[in-house]
Amino acid sequence: MFVLAGLGNMGPQYERTRHNVGFDTIDFLAVKYRITNFKHKHKSLIADGVIQGQRTMLVKPQTYMNNSGEAIREILDYYKIPPEQLIVIYDDADIDVGKLRIRAKGSAGTHNGMRSILSHIKTEDFPRIRIGIGKAPEKMDMADFVLSRFTEEERELINHTIERAALAAVTIICASVDAAMSRYNG
């Protein structure tokens, strides 16, 4: 089984913010593959189903972004899923709006949610899909920026990027990380 975990914050005040593009990608996949049986379990909203013939669990941690590792660790331990079958989808302020960056492994960079995951599962060896949300304006606090909403123009672009991120996740599941990187990076 694969675990597709989109990072974000729960609650209406965070919906459609830059920090919630991971949640938005999970929501897109849930609709596209009719995986609607979400339940609250393991400090997350989880739903399982089949994507292109592969058993898959969609996950939206409900621990707030900075504690995402608690939920991810609990899921991997409970279902005995190796980290290589975890795919994390999250925002990245170091990438231009609308760009994707897919990697087979790596550090957390400046992302606190990923830092939490790495701390809890004790490995960097799992695929991740980073969705570019752009850089904060010069005098804007980073926390305020990631919790802000996209402009109308950016939202149109990010909706397309969320769809591409979902397709990249499916490519990882069905083919490989390398296939997803060659098709969707950039």
Image (spheres, helix red, strand yellow):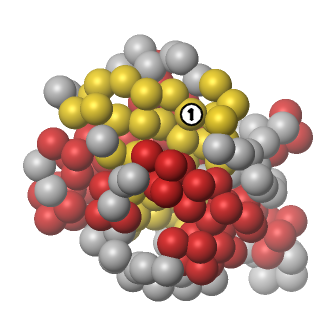
In depth, the one of 156 and 63 nearer the eye is 63
Q: Residue at x 29, y 25 (%)?
A: 50
Q: In the image, 148: left or right of 3? A: right
| Image: 94 above or below 61 | below
| Image: 95 above or below 74 | below
- Occupied quadrant, residue 139: bottom right
Q: In the image, 46: left or right of 140? A: left
Q: Residues within 10 Å of mark 1 (few under 14, many from 20)?
A: many
In depth, the one of 135 and 38 nearer the eye is 38
Q: Residue at x 44, y 20 (%)?
A: 35
Residue 28 image point, x, y percent:
48, 30
Q: Residue at x 33, y 45 (%)?
A: 2
In depth, the one of 75 and 56 nearer the eye is 75
Residue 175 image point, x, y percent:
11, 49
State the residue position of label 1: 46
Question: Tag 1: residue type?
Answer: Ile
Name the image quarter holding the C terminus. Answer: bottom left
Q: How many marks?
A: 1
Residue 142 image point, x, y percent:
79, 75
Work out whether residue 58 can be spotted: yes
Q: In the image, 47: left or right of 44? A: left
Q: Residue at x 85, y 34 (%)?
A: 12
Name the image quarter holding the N terminus. Answer: top left
Q: In the image, 68: left or right of 108? A: right
In depth, the one of 62 and 110 nearer the eye is 62
- Occupied quadrant, residue 93: bottom right
Residue 116 image point, x, y percent:
65, 73
Give the secondary structure at mark 1: strand
